[in-house]
Amino acid sequence: MHYTIKVYQDDDYTVYVYVNSNSLIFENTNYSVDYNQKVSKEDIQIKWMTLSGSTEPKENDQLGLANVKILKDGSVVNEKVISFVGKGVKAITDVIG
């Protein structure tokens, strides 16, 4: 699986986050965050995690989550946890449940 998170800023300082995957169970998504100044690389934090919360993937514990934080002056302005497997887990739950 390939997961991609791209962060852009337009001329009115709105920050756009685009999330993509080649997984059949993930629906590509995007969202925007109002931001009244130029964003820097240091203002964007992306922490990749496995479903068990580890940052080190293993054969039986692959990456499936990304915690995306947008900071301003060291404080969190926006934070989202992106699940790349949520739709698949829901589908399995629906079938079993």
Image (cartoon, rainbow, N blue to C red):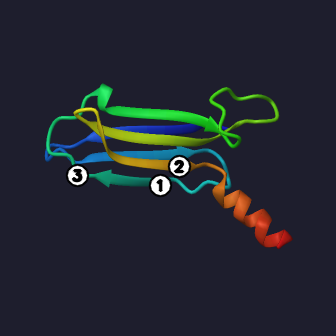
Q: Which residue corresponds to mark 2?
A: 82
First along the sequence among labels 2 and 3:
3
Q: Which residue is mark 1?
A: 29
Residue 27 found in image quarter = bottom right
Q: Residues within 10 Å of mark 1 (few under 14, many from 20)?
A: few
Q: Residue furthest right?
A: 96
| Residue pointed to by mark 3 | 34
Residue closest to the eye, 79 or 38:
79
Q: Specify whether 58 is left or right of 32.
A: right
Mark 1 belongs to which amino acid? Thr
Q: State which mark lies toward you, 1 or 3.
A: 3
Secondary structure beneath label 3: loop
The numbered mark, 1 or 3, whose residue comes first in the sequence reads 1
Q: CA distance from mark 1 to mark 2?
A: 10 Å
> Circles 1 and 2: CB distance less than 8 Å?
yes
Tell me the crowding category of disc 3: few under 14, some 14 to 19, or many 20 or more residues within 10 angstroms, Cα based.
few
Q: Amino acid at mark 2?
A: Ile
